[in-house]
């Protein structure tokens, strides 16, 4: 009994709060409250519509106190002191100053879901002085109508210049045992299926949630990654993520599942250190999106707004791309990246391919690439991705191979110039592929040459890959040193006017606002896993709530043949999706880079359904989220850039349903021909994925639709304005 | 009693040897014997003139058995197996084949001590098959008249493709408690004074031997570095080192001081692994030089002979260089590398130098560099090294700073183009300086731009530096990954026709035969330490027996003012050398790159002595080692390339002595004017270093010299052919 009292008492003192300072969102729905705890620890809370969504949560960082390195001159001694300063940057603070301000501007993205994005927030910058250490830190809060962003800032000062982060100690204290859509915390991959569970169940489900990957490093039985989607018992949606991850290590979250408090967990370097900082500098933004309407979360542009404006002056060369590729055939095992089976291992420049016996399965051969170019040209695709065109694929990962690819030497059966000219004559671009195998030094050594090579041979976009463990050895895919590498590649590519689509790199955090040549990223479990054993049917109803909040994903939809053994008898995988669901993905998985992943022969089998992929736009003037529930369904309508045509897509999870929506997004008074690509009544992602019904109807902004959606199903609609004659004879909806 | 018997019995079985295979040196003085121990462990011995110098010593490597990484394709699984193979590559071997051969050729180095080098050896290649594992390893021995070289070779095979070295297990079993000239084993620096001691005393003297450095990592209380110089009680000189260190980690030696057995100890990477290998590949050569005449050790060209022939086709652009520099003044603290004291820290491209207040001590200012150019031109120097010319020196090391220098941005007071044109008008080159601060990724990112910048601005040589801890963090100055970086820089420089002189890089291993643009290296305790507290007076009598065996050192001799406080009252260091000793170094410390380190004003004070530095050559047709004893003295005569002029240098340790030598190296029948620069009778490195006597005498090949040499002293001689009139009146020797 006494014990209980003591605990309560302790609990009280712990959060015995000094005068709190409040910040309201422009619409007044959010209130952020900042205060210092008795020991001078910064703390904040966040309330939405009068309800607390983030309980008192501590802020700060723990620094590493390095041993004094032998100095050679005064300057060195001076800066060294900072490294030896006290480790705590999380207590003993006093508020030196508080500045509040408002900001409201609109900007037009180079590509995107909408033509114009409003960046509207109220800001509070709290300047904190640490007693004793004479060190200063600013915590800057930006409160939007869709949520909160805050970051740490370290201004120029005498006693905090260079410092090493041991751990960031940012808390996100939950108000209860919420439902979470999570993937295991990992330093090297995000390619996991999402688990939906109560926070209290994370620990118990962790082992099952961890599936194997070419490179992976977990750190905690309750560690999860951001963007993390949550839902409270009373129907509030919360999303935790970060924005503007630049020259800092990637943040995961570690859950204290007794108190339901998430705390930041940074990715370490080879020495276990988590960040090398030099003031003046800042952390990335930590973001908390909140709404009682799930649609607000996926419509939010907060992550972009927390990034810097575009740094590329002339952006005319950056164009959305719809493409096909020599890719799915390798992913399914039907063909190979490699050219020969002769070599136990390969040494670039030494291994003689000219004498090697072709294995007969090499996908990127001249004749086949020409077929893809023809197919792209005939069906209005902009480009063809060709993987496995360059030497080295016989021996490319799993052995920490340093000099693994040179990025400029084609296989004997890939006739570079012939294909360059052929593609040009057909008005089709070839997309370059730079697989680095995680060997980042090797890639940087070849980057300039490789980018020059691209421009000389007519390539203006590159897909990069980081499969396998990172070199330098001991670094991770998400450690600061490698985050710096990805950024280096983005900016170097921009200098060459090259569009970049990085796979296995860190998940995006809105940086595409600043560097719009970053037209795609993987950084999540994409369609390829449908050929590696399959993904959960509701996977695509979660990604827009998590991975997509930071930027577009090169998800590669458009699989029409779900039985992978039809492509490769040795591969028993099944694509857990209906054909109609695959069509809807072109809308629900927003990206300026969209692939039609399947083989041409599979599209030829379903010309009526393929028509939608040919028609659908990849850049937009407007987007309307009509239905959304994480793990269940998403329905979105988008207005194509320039043309005024509307397209709609809806994806569904495991449970069959009827989607009842209104077309009030259409222009009043106009009549449209709506072509609806829906699931057949008997459609099912597993048993009958290719059952679909296409119907043409006449609709207006007053029309309503009631549409059946199968398990793992979906539907897609294209809207074209129709005059009387065109609409004549069409059933009205 | 029984115990003793058992031990002896065990001792016997341990080295119970199967049939030995013998290899003789061309002159028959050496016999190497190879055999397999009972457990199939390779073993060798080395005898010199009938005496064993290396007792039975084991050979082999221990591999790391990595965990199976999740595979994505068959090829991956296949190669992965090799990583999982048994860890032992040191036992269970059977001899599959033994090939012997002889080799004898001569080659002409681009620069060097002699015009022609003979490469003459008998070779034995033993092919070993490992039972059970079906793995193959070749040990190749090359026995020269000056010693043994051997290496491990891993041919292309099925079961040993990729492998990770946990440790190399090469033994060098000593025959007794020899005297060693050693420096502490370290992964990051060789900048130590040598300790002379019995092997049994190493452990006790280690702590004292470790002096502080900007980056250092010791690994064992009995760890020492190579090249290691040894002397046996019966007067045999032994040197242990390595040759052709390429894409492998640097070898140190760990002493088992109970049994007096040295074993190889490789430098680990950030993960503690010691080498990533892909067959076909080889280890560097392990070398054992032996002689009963110390002169043979320093005259040996074995290390070069074990390297590949020159890979640079056209070498006309590679020229020996005698230079002065804006350097000693910073080392002594008289002036500074930095331009201003305004900044607590620097961010390149952001910190605004144009507004900064100059500190008034910046050495590399236009006016001062012009003075150096004038001095160089007036005194026949080829070049001027200028350090501290580029922005960033206010904040350059000790903080693991990634973007530390850009290598192309001069300080406001260094007028690049003006100096380029001025130097050109005076026929003098400026030597570029690239301090990397150990940030190797940053250097590689800027290397192409920096080398182009050099060529555009008339620079054809660069001094690089690696002060401070290595980035990527966790790597070491001597780990495989960074060895690879140094080699990358050498080959990249060669592509730009740039001569390279790397400081704080790994000690050379004869690679300059293959890449003669590597005209210098530091990689030992150089003259700078005379301004950092001083070095042992006999240091220069040891370096030619150790550091110099792998290649030339940019030792930077020529200090005339030994009292450093005369340059900088705040620096109480003393240069432990007489002035005559400093002159002799131009001969005894062979290098195609020789500096006159001191300030012009100090040379102006001693014009007669300075004359020798002006006269002495830097490239040679022939060299004769006349006297040599490690730690005591070295005397060498060299014949200048082309001119036929002879020069002689002699350095001494602590003990004063009389050097009695014959001039029989001179051309018979000719008379020479010999200018002898010797120590004054009262000269002493500490108390009276500037006491010297210069005398001119007439000499022939029959002449003999008896010359006093002071503690830490030396003498230098220049020989010029003289006709009767010239010789007239000159005292004959």
Image: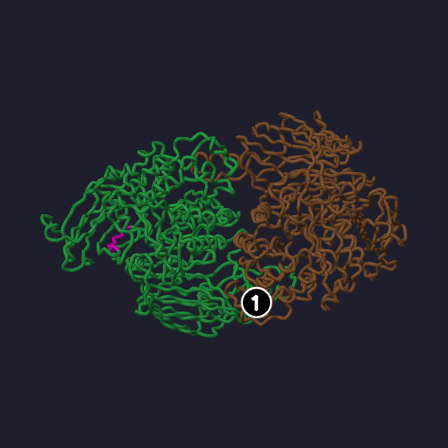
Chain colours: A brown, B green
Q: Nearer the viewer, residue A216 or A379?
A: A379
Q: Which residues are magenta?
A: B632-640
Residue that appears at 27% across and 40% down: B560
Q: Secondary structure at mark 1?
A: loop
Where in the figure is residue A611, as x and y percent of width and height?
78, 58
Where in the figure is residue B204, as x and y percent of width and height?
41, 48
**Residue farthest toward the front in the current orientation of the protein:** A725
Q: Nearer the viewer, residue A650 or B194?
A: A650
Where in the figure is residue B513, as x and y percent of width and height?
37, 59
Q: Nearer the viewer, residue B592 or A3?
A: B592
Where in the figure is residue A276, as x and y percent of width and height?
56, 41
Q: As drawn, is A283 to the left or to the right of A174? A: left
Q: Residues within 10 Å of mark 1 (few under 14, many from 20)?
A: some
Check the picture and name the quadrant holding the N terminus of chain A: top right
- The answer to which quarter of the image holds residue A696 is bottom right
Query: Vertically, is B566 above or below B513?
Result: above
Query: Vertically, is A2 above or below B417?
Result: above
Q: As drawn, is B631 to the left or to the right of A91? A: left
Q: Main secondary structure of the magenta part?
A: strand
Q: Nearer the viewer, residue B682 or B679?
A: B679
Q: Is residue A689 visible?
A: yes
Q: As drawn, is A333 to the left or to the right of B5? A: right
Query: Vertically, is B174 above or below B477?
Result: below
Q: Is residue A657 visible?
A: no
Give the residue pinned by disc 1. Answer: A412
The count of marks equals 1
**Residue farthest toward the left in the current orientation of the protein:** B729
**Residue B639 belongs to the span the image colors magenta:** yes
- The answer to which quarter of the image holds residue A621 is top right
Chain identity of mark 1: A
**Residue A615 belongs to the span the image colors magenta:** no
């Amino acid at each position: 009994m006494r014990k209980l009292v003591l605990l309560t008492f302790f609990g009280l003192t712990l959060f015995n709060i000094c005068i709190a300072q409040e910040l309201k969102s422009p619409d007044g729905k959010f209130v952020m409250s900042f205060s210092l705890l008795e020991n001078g620890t910064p703390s904040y809370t966040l309330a939405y519509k009068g309800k607390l969504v983030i309980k008192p949560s501590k802020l700060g960082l723990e620094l590493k106190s390095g041993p004094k390195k032998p100095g050679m001159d005064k300057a060195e001694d001076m800066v060294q002191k900072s490294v030896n300063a006290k480790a705590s940057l999380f207590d003993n603070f006093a508020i030196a100053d508080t500045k509040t301000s408002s900001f409201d501007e609109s900007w037009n993205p180079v590509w995107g879901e909408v033509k114009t994005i409003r960046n509207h927030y109220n800001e509070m910058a709290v300047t904190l002085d640490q007693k004793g250490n004479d060190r200063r830190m600013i915590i800057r809060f930006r409160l939007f109508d869709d949520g909160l962003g805050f970051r740490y800032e370290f201004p120029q000062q005498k006693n905090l210049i260079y410092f090493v982060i041991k751990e960031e100690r940012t808390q996100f204290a939950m108000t209860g045992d919420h439902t979470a859509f999570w993937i295991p915390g990992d330093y090297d991959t995000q390619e996991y299926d999402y688990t939906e569970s109560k926070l209290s169940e994370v620990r118990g489900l962790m082992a099952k949630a961890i599936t194997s990957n070419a490179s992976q490093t977990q750190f905690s039985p309750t560690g999860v990654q951001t963007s993390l989607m949550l839902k409270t018992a009373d129907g509030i949606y919360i999303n935790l993520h970060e924005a503007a991850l630049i020259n800092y290590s990637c943040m995961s979250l570690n859950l204290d599942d007794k108190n339901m408090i998430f705390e930041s967990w940074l990715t370490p370097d080879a020495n276990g250190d988590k960040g090398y900082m030099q003031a003046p500098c800042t952390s990335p933004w930590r973001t908390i999106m909140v709404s009682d309407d799930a649609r607000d979360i996926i419509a939010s542009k907060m992550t972009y707004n927390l990034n810097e404006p575009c740094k590329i002056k002339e952006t005319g060369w950056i164009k959305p791309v719809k493409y096909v590729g020599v890719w799915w055939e390798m992913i399914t095992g039907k063909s190979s990246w490699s050219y020969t089976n002769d070599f136990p291992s390969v040494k670039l420049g030494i291994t003689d391919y000219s004498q090697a016996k072709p294995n007969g399965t090499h996908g990127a051969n001249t004749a086949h690439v020409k077929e893809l170019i023809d197919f792209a040209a005939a069906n209005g695709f902009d480009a063809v991705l060709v993987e496995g065109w360059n030497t080295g694929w016989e021996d490319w990962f799993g052995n920490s191979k340093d000099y693994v690819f040179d990025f400029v030497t084609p296989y004997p059966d890939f006739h570079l110039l012939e294909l360059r000219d052929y593609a040009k004559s057909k008005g089709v671009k070839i997309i370059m592929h730079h697989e680095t195998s995680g060997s980042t030094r090797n890639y940087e050594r070849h980057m300039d040459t490789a980018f020059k090579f691209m421009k000389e041979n007519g390539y203006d976009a590159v897909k990069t890959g980081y499969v396998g463990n990172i070199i330098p050895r001991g670094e991770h895919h998400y450690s600061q040193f490698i985050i710096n590498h990805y950024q280096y590649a983005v900016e170097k590519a921009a200098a060459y006017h090259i569009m970049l689509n990085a796979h296995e790199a860190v998940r995006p955090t809105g940086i595409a606002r600043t560097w719009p040549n970053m037209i795609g990223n993987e950084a999540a479990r994409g369609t390829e896993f449908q050929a590696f054993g399959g993904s959960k049917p509701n996977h695509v109803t979660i990604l827009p709530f998590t991975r997509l909040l930071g930027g577009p994903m090169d998800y590669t939809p458009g699989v029409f043949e779900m039985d992978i053994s039809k492509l490769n008898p040795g591969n028993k995988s099944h694509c857990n999706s209906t054909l109609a669901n695959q069509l809807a993905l072109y809308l629900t998985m927003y990206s300026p880079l969209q692939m039609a992943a399947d083989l041409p022969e599979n599209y030829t089998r379903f010309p009526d359904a393929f028509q939608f992929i040919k028609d659908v736009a990849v850049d937009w003037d407007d987007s309307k989220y009509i239905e959304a529930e994480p793990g269940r369904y998403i329905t979105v309508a988008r207005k194509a850039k320039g043309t005024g045509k509307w397209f709609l897509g809806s994806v569904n999870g495991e449970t069959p349903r009827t989607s009842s929506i209104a077309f009030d997004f259409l222009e009043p008074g106009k009549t449209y021909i709506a072509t609806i690509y829906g699931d057949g009544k008997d459609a099912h992602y597993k048993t009958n994925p290719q059952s679909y019904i296409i119907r043409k109807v006449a609709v207006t902004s007053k029309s309503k639709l009631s549409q059946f959606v199968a398990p793992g199903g979906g539907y897609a609609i294209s809207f074209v304005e129709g005059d009387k004659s065109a609409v004549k004879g069409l059933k009205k909806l």
